[in-house]
Image (cartoon, rainbow, N blue to C red):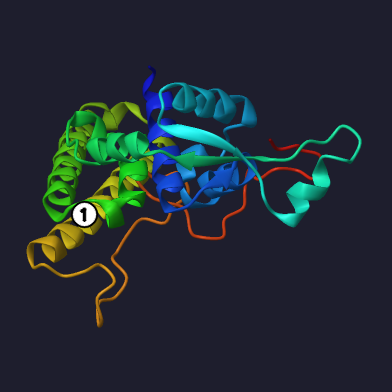
Amino acid sequence: MSRRSGILEFAVLGLLRESPMHGYELRKRLNTSLGVFRAFSYGTLYPCLKTLVANGWLIEEPGHTTEDALAAPLAGRRAKIVYRLTAEGKEHFEELLSQTGPDAYEDEHFAARFAFFGQTSRDVRMRVLEGRRSRLEERLEKMSASLARTRERLDDYTLELQRHGMESVEREVRWLNELIESERAGRDLKGPGRGEPTRDTTEGAPGVLPRTGDTSGLDTPGDTAT
């Protein structure tokens, strides 16, 4: 399994743990809630769903909404399939949630893991956050050393770009420090009186989740859903 497909399977299981959905709903949630999936297509999602069904982690059910009931008689249309998490699928997702290995710290994996922190135990959240911070601190050290070696050979614009990259990583480290402090103090991220954590909201910054309501990459009216 590739790293990309593993992240997608994790996210699909997590979303379906909240409630059953059909493919179009899943794709829309992945697009708007997890920025790492903003550009993926049905051609990526449906093989993933079929694999999860084959593994016994999901089951397929016919849709039961009024829209679905009316869909079949229409020319060329069929009722949407709803995907539901099985008991084995829930157990597998909980096992994935408990993992704190290096993959959990990488840019794409971390964003997906963070999106499901509300379903993750505090001790696991702490290990993932501290691992992510350590990984970014190592990245900062390498970036700083590289900049010091090449500064004299770079033009002003390239230097500015490198500084911007370092500042983005530094802002995420500060954000992680705030989250780790809250976890250690036993405070809920949504607790009363706690302000929004400082974060880098630059589009595409590592580990940054998109704002809710971002509909970039959503389906066009001509898309069809199963």
Q: Is any atom of residue 165 visible in this view? A: no
At which x and y percent is residue 157? 44, 39
Q: Is residue 143 left or right of residue 21?
A: left
**7 lies above or below 16:** above
At which x and y percent is residue 184? 8, 62
The residue wearing badge 1 is: 176
Query: Residue visible at 36% across and 55% down?
Result: 200
Which is nearer the eye, 63 or 179? Answer: 63
Q: Is any atom of residue 139 visible in this view? A: yes
Which is nearer the eye, 123 or 15? Answer: 15
Amino acid type of the residue that numbered disc 1 sits on in the rendered structure: Leu
Q: Is residue 57 left or right of residue 77?
A: left
Q: Secondary structure at mark 1?
A: helix
Dot 1 crowding, Cα within 10 Å, few <14, some 14–19, many 20+? many
Query: Residue visible at 13% across and 50% down?
Result: 126
Quadrant of the frame with the N terminus: top left
Which is nearer the eye, 95 or 201? Answer: 95
Which is nearer the eye, 133 or 93? Answer: 93
Quadrant of the frame with the C terminus: top right
Query: Residue visible at 36% across and 50% down?
Result: 115
How many marks overall? 1
Q: Is residue 68 left or right of residue 119?
A: right
In the orientation shown, which residue stands out farthest toward the bottom?
A: 193
At which x and y percent is residue 84? 49, 42
In the orientation shown, which residue stands out farthest toward the right?
A: 75
**197 lies above or below 67:** below
Query: Residue visible at 74% across and 40% down?
Result: 79
In the orientation shown, which residue stands out farthest toward the left?
A: 184
**139 lies above or below 47:** below
The image quadrant of residue 60 is top right
The image quadrant of residue 182 is bottom left
At which x and y percent is residue 212? 50, 60
